[in-house]
Image (cartoon, helix red, strand yellow):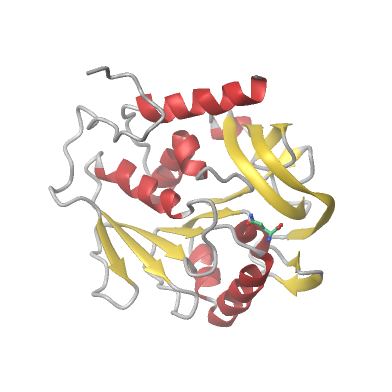
Amino acid sequence: MSTEPTSGYAPPPEPSGFAPASRSGPRHRAAGDDPASESALRIVWLCPDLLSTYGDRGNMLILARRAYVRGIPVETIEVRSDEPVPQEGDIYLLGGGEDGPQALAAQRLNANQGLHRAVARGATALVVCAGYQLIGTSFFAKGAKCAGLGILDITSDRGATRAVGELASEADPALNLPTLTGFENHGGRTHLGPGLTPLARVTTGVGNDGATEGVWHGKIIGTYMHGPVLARNPALADLLISWAIGSPVAPIDDTWPNRLRAERLAAIRG
Ligand code: GLN
């Protein structure tokens, strides 16, 4: 049988050279289950009931998988918007969403303040599209200006048209990442305060404003890239894991992610 990829999904082969942490794979639990083990890398996906467009669950799964194949014990926790934000997380994730759910997520996260506390103590965070907009001070949803979480000095207003399509960019050189690739679909335009650094410079698409894309501040990455973003950009996933564990991670076999990347970057060129 051919080993070449086809248009259907085939699971990637097991990477060689890294012993899985256990046979059972990453541990998944709900917010109310037993507390996470102290030694595990704890990945917390917030508001999956409100913010989960374009396969945002994939970001959690990819982080878990990439930690697991390196022998890092890992636990994923999904926390609905009406549940308290756990404080023991190492990496927090927020996904994209439509305006209404986005506004509700901001209200609930503001009422809870748990994400604020987590990032203030140095937790790693990846926030995507609606999640990215709502960590700023304000954003627009259904024509109304909404209070964001105020975690970063970012505001979002609305563009004349929706930004829809492929988004490619070159990351800040200090991050040492290859070309970033994703899919964007948003009405908002985002403006960074003076103390903030964009994640990347846009080469195709719109991102924040047609020139810059996302934000990078400490261990927080905000982006307009869907895809899910970590499926298309495994080096970004590894960067988040390395921030969370406090040390670099060894390379793994990225044959399949690299095929996806090559396909999407060729689609832009073609
Ligand atoms: N509702 C926001 C906007 O349209 C975010 C959209 C999204 O997350 N895809 O700008």
Q: Is residue 56 left or right of residue 213?
A: left
Q: Is residue 204 left or right of residue 85?
A: right
Of the 4 image quadrants, the one containing the N terminus is: top left
Against 91, residue 67 (above or below) is above
Question: Which quadrant contains ligand 1?
Answer: bottom right
Q: Residue at x 24, y 30 (%)?
A: 13
Front one among 24 and 221: 24
Q: Is residue 192 visible?
A: no
Q: Residue at x 36, y 41 (%)?
A: 247
Residue 160 picture location, percent across and down: 87, 51
Against 15, residue 112 (above or below) is below
Front one among 57 and 180: 57
Residue furthest to the right in view is: 160
Front one among 215 and 263: 263
Residue furthest to the left in view is: 23
Of the 4 image quadrants, the one containing the C terminus is: top right
Residue 10 picture location, percent across and down: 31, 33
Residue 213 appears in which quarter of the rendering?
top right
Q: Is residue 210 left or right of residue 240?
A: right
Q: Is residue 143 visible?
A: yes
Residue 240 picture location, percent across and down: 45, 46
Against 177, residue 64 (above or below) is below
